[in-house]
Image (cartoon, helix red, strand yellow):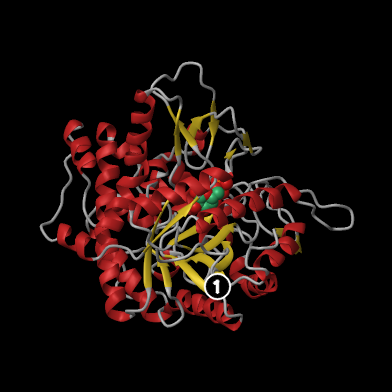
Amino acid sequence: MTGRVPDGFPRGFLWGGATAACQMEGAWNEGGKGMSVADTAMHYDKDTPRSEYKKVTYDKIRAAMEYTDTDRYPKRHGIGFYHRYKEDIALCAEMGFTAFRMSIAWSRIFPKGDETEPNMEGITFYQGVFDELMKYSIEPIVTLSHFEMPLHLALEYGGWTNRKLIDFYVRYCMVCFKYFGDRVKYWINFNEMNGTRFNTFPSTGIIREDWGDKFEQATYQAAHHQFVASAKAVYQLRCMYPEAKMGCMVVPFTRYPGSCKPEDVMKMHQDMHLDCYFYTDIYMRGEYPGYALRYFKDRNIELETAAEDFALLKDYTTDFLAFSYYSTSISSVELEGWETTDGNLHTQLKNPHLEASAWGWQIDPLGLRYQLGCFCDRYNNPPVMVVENGLGAQDIVAADGSIHDNYRIEYLRRHIQQLREAILDGVNVIAYTTWSAIDMVSSGTSEMAKRYGFIYVDLDDNNEGTLERKRKDSFYWYKQVIASNGEAL
Ligand code: BGP
C-alpha cells in the first residue's frame, strides 16, 4: 500500500476570507467606473420574500438609473473599501491571512463593457490592492465576475445571451492578466456559475420580461457563452502565465433525499445534476453531459453554438474547483407536508434535523464533508477550494465596544472540523476562505444588518455610521486557527 493518511491541514494550506467588489468597494461612480448590474439592487429587509427581491424589471432598472444617490442602493456605497483598503488588508494581515478572495469590478476596468481600451484608473486601483496584499505575503484569489457585470451589457446586448459577450469578457480577462498577472496566481472565472439559473440578472444580465416562455432556454444559452468564454480565457492565461490557475465555482446546493424511497433518491440525483454538476462537469471534464442533452431535448431547448466551441471546452477546462457552502437542501417527489425555508440563492425544503440561521439558512457542517467527498469522487480528486462559508447574523456591539460573536465561532469551528475530516479522507482541499473577511452589504437583500465578517463595520441599513472597523471575538479566534494551521479550534 502506498500513501499515508494526512495528520491535518497540509503545509501551505491557504487560510483567509472572501469578499466581492460590488458588496464592499462602494465608490460606484468614482475612478471612471461605469454602472453595474449590482448598482441597481435595492435594499430589502430580511422578511421580504425572495420572489420580490429577485424580481428584476425594466421599471426597477429605469428607476435605479434615474436615482443618483446611494441610500436606496447600498451596493453603491458598500463599506468604503475603495478608500480604506489599506486599513482592511492590514487587519486581515493581523489575523494572519495567507489568502484573500476578492473580485474585480468589470465596470471599473471597462465601464460599459464593450470598449476597446480599458479605464486606467480602475487598473491603478487594483494594482494598489494587489501591492498591499503582496506587502503581507497574502495570496489573492481573484474572481473575474462576481454578480457585477456592466449594466450596459445587460441593456444593450441582452447580457450573456448574446455571443458578443464572449469577446468582451475575454478582452476584460486579458487586461486583468496583463496588468495583474504578475501578482495573481489563482483566478476564478465566474462566481457561483450556476447562478445563471438561480440568480439570473446578477449572473447574466438577462431581464426576464424579454424572454417569456423562452426564459429557461435563455439561461442555458447564457451559460453556454460563459463556458466558451471561460475556455478562451483559460487559453489566454496559459499563454500569458503558464503557472497561473483558473478555477470554476458553484454553489452546490448539496442535497439529501427526503426519504429512502427510490423515487426521492432519483430526484436528488437529478437535482444535483441540473443544479450543480451540469456546470462543474463542463468546466472540469470539458463536455456536455448526456443527462443535459436529454433534458434539452425533452424541453425543446436548442442552443446556438459554433463549431469551434466543443473543442475549446474540451481543451481548456478549469484547473481547480471552488465552491461556496452555507447549507444543504432536500429533494423529494412529495412536496406536501414539507415546510420551506430560505437558503443561499434558493428556497428549500426544511430539514427537521438541522438548525438554521436567523435568515433561515440551514446549518449543516457534516454536509460540507459529504460535498467535498462527492467532488473528490466525481473529478478524480482535483484541487478544491472552499471559497465561501459563514454565518449571517446580527451582531451587537457591547458598551465597551467589544463584539461577542461566539455563534459565528461555533459555526466556523464545526465546519473547519469537517473540512479537516475531509482532508483526512484524502480530499485535496487547498484553500478555505470564509464568507466573509469583513462585514459588507449582503448579496441577496443588500442589507447591512446581516453580518458575516471577523471585522465589524460601523454602518447600518440606513447608511448611517462612522465606517469604523472593530475586531470581533471571532477575529482573535480565527487568528489562532490560522497560526495553528487549523489545529487550535
Ligand atoms: C453568495 C455570494 C456572496 C455572498 C453570500 C452570502 O451567494 O457569492 O456574494 O454575499 O452568498 O449571501 P448574502 O449576502 O445574500 O447573505
Q: Quadrant of residue 318?
A: bottom left
Looking at the image, residue 459 sits to the left or right of residue 263; the answer is: right
Q: Give the farthest residue toward the front.
A: 1
Q: Nearer the viewer, residue 484 or 274?
A: 484
Q: Position of residue 90 (x, y in %)?
A: 67, 75
Give the residue drawn at x 36%, y 80%: 178
Q: How many dots with numbers?
A: 1
Residue where numbered disc 1 is placed: 11
Q: Nearer the viewer, residue 262 or 325?
A: 262
Q: Position of residue 331 (x, y in %)?
A: 42, 30
Give the residue drawn at x 29%, y 39%: 210
Looking at the image, residue 394 sits to the left or right of residue 181; the answer is: right
Q: Quadrant of residue 244?
A: bottom left
Q: Nearer the viewer, residue 203 or 423?
A: 423
Q: Nearer the viewer, residue 79 or 366?
A: 366
Give the residue drawn at x 54%, y 42%: 327
Q: Residues within 10 Å of mark 1 (few under 14, many from 20)?
A: few
- The answer to whether one can see residue 66 in this image is no
- The answer to whether one can see residue 428 in this image is yes
Element at label 1:
loop
> Where does the C terminus fall, quadrant-wise?
bottom right
Q: Give the farthest residue toward the left.
A: 307
Q: Position of residue 117 (x, y in %)?
A: 33, 75
Q: Amino acid at mark 1?
A: Arg
Looking at the image, residue 305 sits to the left or right of residue 394; the answer is: left
Looking at the image, residue 397 sits to the left or right of residue 187; the answer is: right
Q: Quadrant of residue 352?
A: top right
